[in-house]
């Protein structure tokens, strides 16, 4: 086999030649038209909530929703006793997605209030066969987020890999008797409800590939600069809150997902656990609490600053996008930094600046073999650490 060094040829290596990386597909805040891209569910709540979901027009009239450049608001009625369920909104994106990266900046969420069941989630057709990805969800006075997947038969995940949450159940398949799903509980009080709102929320990012589903959360004080940029790169984001992998076909178990925001009350989750929650002291039933305590729900609103969906523009899911385009010329040297976290042993940040010395022990110095498909021709990147330059030289064959 013949080796040609990268440095002897002028080659747009990354960014412009089909290297797998995320590119913006939909910016829901473009043109101040957020709500135009959603349908408003105004029928009975499929989760049996004590809620009266409103149409778009009714939501505008009742001031349950509003929008301005760079922000949308979705609240609930907090003025009236509501014997027929509390007015609220549930919106579903008109577009559907099959894999990609969904990033949302939420400044305030409805969580942490007895009787509430808010969620930011995605759902496919013919539930549960099209799958459901619950990115941000909880009930009552819950203090941290639960990330949950629901699927048709034949999907289970393993409690391995690197994520900061705690896996509470591994079977994703729902059936008539058991709709628990597979779940990773965050445990981080900044991730949900009162703690989330105290810190002015943050950014959730959900990455769905053929090999798994990961959810990242970044409190407002530590949002990566690229997360809502033109080419976000999860490989630089550290350990996710949740990462589902295992005995599951993540392509066929999740299809044509639509993005949903909703705030419901009581019902199949918040209502079912009411009597065993600390909320039980407030009222005999969840419904009676929600009906008779309007002012308790003044804070049950979503305030959202951004929602973007990115698609992977390359073919090779195993190749990882650089955070910016790097063009190799006859004189440039490409440095590839081995991540120090064992969480992401196969991902690399690429830049033309010399890297800091690797800090992981053996992993930082191991030779690396990467593969990418560029313009239909197969290319193998090989390299080993060049300790003098504190980076890695890359050659191409
Ligand atoms: C909603 O309001 C607009 C503007 O007032 C009106 O043209 C439209 O017919 C209304 N839609 C429904 C479904 O009532
Ligand atoms: C329901 O399913 C979950 C996930 O597979 C499992 O952990 C739990 O034990 C099941 N509960 C019952 C009552 O079968």
Image (cartoon, rainbow, N blue to C red):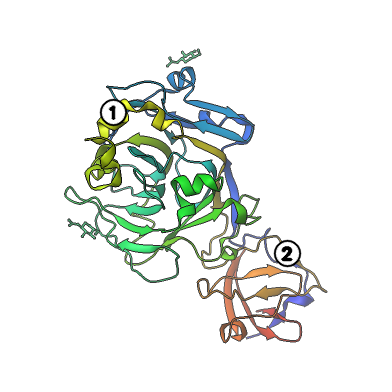
**Residue 63 vertical placement versus 316 (above, below):** above
Does residue 255 appear left or right of residue 29 in this picture? left
- Label drawn at residue 326: 2
Residue 233 visible to the viewer: yes
Q: Kindly identify the residue that appears in the image at 51 percent across and 29 percent down.
A: 35
- Quadrant assignment, res 384: bottom right
Q: Position of residue 359 (x, y in %)?
A: 63, 80
At 55% from the left edge and 33% from the top edge, which residue is drawn? 72
Q: Which mark is residue 44?
A: 1
How many neighbours does mark 2 have within 10 angstroms: few (below 14), some (14-19), or many (20 or more)?
A: some
Q: How many marks?
A: 2
Relative side of 311 to 332, left or right? left
Q: Is mark 1 within 8 Å of ligand 1?
A: no
Residue at image position (61%, 71%) is 348
Give x and y (percent) for residue 275.
22, 43
State the residue at coordinates (55%, 66%).
Answer: 238
The crowding category of the residue bearing disc 1, from other C-alpha atoms within 10 Å (few below 14, some 14 to 19, many at least 20), is few
Residue 55 shown left or right of residue 181 in the figure:
right
Q: Is residue 217 above or below residue 128?
A: below
**Who is closer to the viewer here, 299 or 335?**
299
């Amino acid at each position: 086999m013949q080796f040609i060094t990268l440095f002897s040829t002028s080659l747009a290596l990354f960014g412009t030649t089909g290297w797998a990386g995320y590119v913006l597909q939909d910016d829901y805040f473009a043109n101040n038209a957020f709500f135009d891209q959603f349908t408003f569910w105004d029928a009975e709540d499929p989760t049996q909530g004590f809620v009266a979901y409103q149409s778009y027009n009714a939501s505008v009239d009742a001031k349950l929703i509003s929008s301005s450049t760079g922000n949308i608001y979705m609240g609930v009625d907090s003025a009236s006793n509501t014997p027929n369920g509390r007015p609220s909104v549930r919106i579903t994106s008109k577009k559907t997605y099959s894999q990609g990266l969904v990033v949302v900046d939420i400044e305030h969420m409805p969580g942490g209030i007895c009787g509430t069941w808010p969620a930011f989630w995605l759902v496919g057709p013919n539930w549960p066969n099209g799958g459901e990805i619950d990115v941000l969800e909880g009930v009552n006075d819950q203090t941290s987020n639960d990330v949950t997947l629901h699927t048709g038969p034949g999907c289970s995940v393993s409690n391995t890999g690197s994520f900061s949450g705690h896996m509470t159940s591994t079977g994703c398949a729902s059936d008539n008797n058991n709709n628990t799903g597979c779940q990773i509980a965050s445990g981080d009080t900044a991730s949900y409800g009162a703690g989330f709102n105290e810190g002015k929320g943050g950014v959730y990012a959900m990455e769905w590939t053929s090999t798994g589903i990961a959810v990242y959360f970044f409190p407002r004080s530590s949002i990566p600069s690229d997360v809502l940029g033109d080419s976000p790169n999860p490989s630089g984001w550290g350990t996710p809150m949740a990462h589902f992998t295992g005995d599951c076909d993540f392509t066929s178990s999740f299809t044509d997902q639509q993005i949903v925001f909703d705030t419901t009350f009581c019902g199949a989750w918040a209502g079912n656990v009411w009597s065993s929650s600390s909320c039980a002291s407030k009222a005999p039933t969840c419904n009676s609490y929600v009906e008779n305590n309007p002012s308790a729900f003044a804070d049950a609103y979503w305030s959202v600053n951004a929602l973007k969906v990115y698609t992977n523009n390359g073919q090779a899911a195993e190749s990882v996008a650089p955070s910016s385009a790097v063009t190799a010329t006859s004189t440039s040297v490409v440095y590839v930094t081995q991540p120090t976290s064992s969480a992401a042993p196969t991902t690399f940040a690429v830049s033309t600046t010399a890297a800091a010395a690797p800090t992981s022990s053996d992993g930082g110095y191991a030779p690396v073999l990467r593969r990418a498909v560029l313009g239909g021709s197969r290319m193998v990147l090989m390299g080993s650490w060049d300790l003098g330059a504190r980076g890695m030289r890359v050659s191409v064959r």
